[in-house]
Image (cartoon, rainbow, N blue to C red):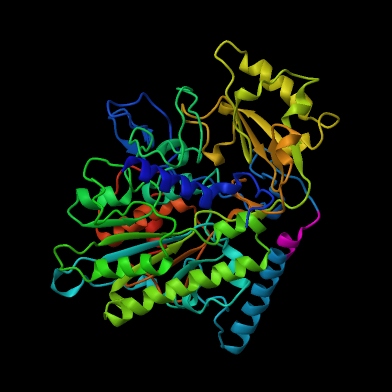
Amino acid sequence: MMAAAEGNELTRAHHLEAADQPPQAGDESIEPEMGSSQANGAAAFGRQTAGGGYVRVKLAEKDTSGFSGRDTEGGPPVGCWLPLSRTQTALAAAGVCLLVLVVIAFGTGLGSPRSPKSTTYGQLGEISQCVRAPVGGEKPTLILISSDGFRWDYLFKVPTPNIDRLRMQGTETATGMMPMYPSITFPNHYSIVTGLHPESHGIIANYFRPADNTSEQFSMANHDARWWLGEPMWVTARKQGLTAAAFFWPGAEVIKPDWPCDPEYCPRYNSALPYEDRVDRVLGWLDLPPEQRPQFMTMYMEDPDHWGHRVGPDAPQIDAAVTRVDAMIGRLLDGLETRGILNTTHVIMVGDHGMTSVCECKDIYLEDLAPWVDLPMDWVNTESPVLSLLPPPDVDVRALHANISRALAPGGISNGEFLSLYLKEDISERFHYSHSPRIAPIVGIVAEGYTVRKTRAEKEGIQCGGVHGFDNALFSMRTIFFGRGPRFGVRNVVPTFRNIELYEVMCDILGLEPAPNNGTAGFKETVLRRSC
């Protein structure tokens, strides 16, 4: 049984993050302040007051430096001004198209399936109207859907009539939703359902050795609750009397107090299960008697991330993957409508990150550091796009950092200036990637489109593909958010926000008291109608 589960998780690893390295040839806001850990190993989730409570702190303004990746907030210069690539040109063109559509829509009073909404930020139209509780005391229902690697501008590539039903009948973000850093699958899926930065919930990468215990190794097949800190939505729901079900969501198979991961409501991950069967299982949960019916459900799809890694974000296979995901949204909405519950059910569709091309030869080889510093390759914890170094305790970390930084400066190793190296404590606060004992003492942030490799031998056989995990402020790393249901305004657009805000939004929809989290106090009022 355990071997089968681990096998499925390894398959998940292949489908989700096989291109943490690009494909091989032949392959088709609370600011966390880490205090002393408590008896159960939980980390501090906010600024702790003298009385032991937590106080909410507003998030810093988001970086909107755009395609260059340049940090305008005094953080690391993780990119440079480069000629626009094909992907970046498409993104820029999409922005111009949006502007033209705004002019047309406002001038003619006509809309189209792709036209921007007329709602103004801060004047949220219908959202100001309150929503009455369901008649008869029926509990609200929320379905959370993830489409892995769904970059926010994929909607401009191909018709998506079913996702457009969510957009046009609900709420969306103006230019996508911002993931947390690093913009990779497991950290961000768990941030969505806990409201915590990766440095707070502990899943700081898909694979890593924790700096505070280098003898252990985390992988996506690991369901040991010691790794997964915080309280995910399914636990919050169960603790407060609701029934919850989680379909393949990262972290759902981790057994916690109040969450036994009963197979009836928590199927074991199986990448081979068709998307149609996943949708039908969710609809089947809604057919259960009221006392067994879940009020909170998740569903996960591997696409378009799978194809994004293999062929890059601009390939025609992405269009096919997006079309398939759109069909599944249609299957779900049609099923809700057939049951007569479409307009009483909340549906949130999200992605976990975007994607960028790594087709150009933009490599940084650690073996080239040899003239400046002796860097044993077993000190390399993760390579790209987040480099982390775990030297032995007797190594002078500051001296090692200084020597490598000299090698990365102009005149040093090839492309070295596109890898910004930091002592953990010096990383810009906007990344929220320093206050965890699991994070390595030296971290390198790689510029968009560049790849760090240990040796040139690792490059052999690698083809053009796509990668994510870069600076979460980059437009190419942004993903989608759509919300439909009684608590969401119709044809409503809200400014881009960070995915950690969704936890309290979902709690409010379901009438739950949220666990401590890194979200911004009061944010939910900008997205949801209030209950009467």
| Residue 269 placement (x, y as % from top left) | 38, 52
- 377 to the left or right of 187: right
Q: Nearer the viewer, residue 265 or 387?
A: 265
Question: Please, is residue 342 above or below residue 77 in the view?
Answer: below
Q: Answer with the quarter of the image where residue 523 lies.
A: bottom left
Quadrant occupied by the C terminus:
bottom left
Q: Nearer the viewer, residue 52 or 280?
A: 280
Residue 85 drawn in magenta? yes
> Residue drawn at (33%, 70%), measured in percent from left and top?
280
Residue 34 drawn in magenta? no
Does residue 532 appear in the picture of this structure? no
Q: Nearer the viewer, residue 218 or 511?
A: 218
Does residue 367 appear in the picture of this structure? yes
> Residue drawn at (43%, 36%), measured in percent from left and top?
202
Q: Which residues are the magenta region? A: 83-89
Question: Please, is residue 188 above or below residue 311 in the view?
Answer: above
- 373 to the left or right of 57: right
How many marks overall?
Answer: 0
- 402 to the left or right of 33: right
| Residue 102 placement (x, y as % from top left) | 62, 78
